[in-house]
Amino acid sequence: MPHSVTPDRPGKRERLVASATELLHQDGVQATTLAQIANAADVPPGNVYYYFKTRDDLVHAVIDSRAEQISGLLRSLDRRSSPGARLKGLTNSWAEVAELVAAHGCPLGSLSSELNKCDHDLAGAAAKLFGLVLDWSEEQFRAMGRRNARDLAITLFAGVQGAALLADTLGDPKIMRREARRLERWIDQLSG
Amino acid sequence: MPHSVTPDRPGKRERLVASATELLHQDGVQATTLAQIANAADVPPGNVYYYFKTRDDLVHAVIDSRAEQISGLLRSLDRRSSPGARLKGLTNSWAEVAELVAAHGCPLGSLSSELNKCDHDLAGAAAKLFGLVLDWSEEQFRAMGRRNARDLAITLFAGVQGAALLADTLGDPKIMRREARRLERWIDQLSG
DNA sequence: GTCTATAAGATGATAGAC
DNA sequence: GTCTATCATCTTATAGAC
């Protein structure tokens, strides 16, 4: 039986990024080995270096993947009618993944926290992920007529990230959901 | 010249814990090696195992050291006259170390975030650190006559931890200070 | 009782085979 | 162009010297 007309070649790099994205979130950047990533992606262990020049390159690809994910979320929220509704959609998207956050932390927050320690280059890349969310939120607050839009964006995202850390540490998804709802009420107060 | 009557023996274990506490905060739990810790403590590299049965034992000692530090802070805040003043003293103590937080993250938060990934046993120990702060804060909110004291404590500490993560990621200590002041105003509103 | 030399194991990376 | 066997390095841990 001949092998498929489209061999799995075009998928391997993507499978590696997908496995790495998941494993870095679950087990952390430092603790995850290339062997684990390759194994989870069904790629020969020593073969990662054919697709990525260095380990950090793979982590960079994971960050880029997260950036795409965030951009997609923000674009989908842009369809909503009012800036308040858009911002509440943002907090709600964290509430929706409360179980995941309580199990392994926020995919963005725990990544950034870890990268802030060691690698300056990767930490800068992770900071851009925060920038995406902050810039977008700032825009919404400005559309609401707020002058201190940047500070409000920081307050909002800090609330989300703090809730995520507490939910993770205490292993309680309710914390994430409750804080998300509190932030939604706070957004409503600013709107009206 | 004879060596000191009290050789530095009683200090070595403490020096190791002190060095480890600082290095784990600066470089992270995983990235820090025993050799670095021993070197910083002026103790022979391979000699750490005389004082600690295993690497995790040393990390446990670091967590215990942080617990002492937190307990000391909370005891000192207990002297203040009102529960509102005590809570504002708590947020202010984070504002006071804003530079350190922006450089290496919150000593409690980044530790817990990292340990939540790999080691279940150590993660539990780190969660107790959060518990100290949350229990104490809950007590203060209850003394203010609040029924949802636990939730308020979580909101407060989440605000602190979120601000710390953003200050660290963006490298801006002003974020920590500004959010601390915002939380102080929030406490004032609850008091009055 | 205190410390050092070394073992055992794992990981990132490479040179070269298919 | 794709993959595998192997190297060099580093880190925890231990056995045993002083």
Image (cartoon, coloured by chain):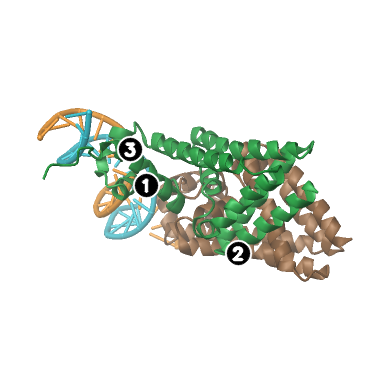
Chain colours: A green, B brown, C orange, D cyan
Q: Are marks 2 and 3 in contact (CB under 8 Å)?
A: no
Cα–Cα span, label 2 and label 3: 36 Å
Sequence order check, earlier mark of 2 and 1: 1
Counting the numbered discs, the total is 3
Instruction: Judge left or right: residue B87 versus residue B59.
Output: right
| In the rendered image, residues at marks 2 and 3 fall on the same chain | yes
Q: Residue furthest right?
A: B192
Q: Which residue is mark 1?
A: A19
**Dot 2 amino acid type:** Lys
Amino acid marked by disc 3: Arg
The reply to whether residue A185 is visible in this rendering is yes
Which residue is pictured at 47% across the width and 38% down the height?
A63
In the rendered image, is residue A116 in sight? Answer: no
- Report, in whole angstroms, how far the alpha carbon at label 3 lies from the one at label 1: 10 Å
Q: Residue at x 78, y 59 (%)?
A: B87
Name the residue that disc number 3 marks.
A13
The residue under the point 71% across, 46% down is A84
Q: Quadrant of residue C15?
A: top left
- Callouts 2 and 1 on one subunit: yes
Question: How would you rate the neighbour count of disc 3 (Cα within 10 Å): few for under 14, some for 14-19, many for 20 or more?
Answer: some
Question: Which amino acid lies under the numbered mark 1 shown in the image of this protein?
Answer: Ser
In front here: A125 or B174? A125
Please rate how many residues cluster around mark 2, counting C-alpha atoms within 10 Å: few if below 14, some from 14 to 19, many from 20. some
| Disc 2/disc 1 C-alpha distance (Å) | 28 Å
Q: In terms of secondary structure, where does tag 2 sit? A: helix
Q: Would you name the residue on which mark 2 appears?
A: A174
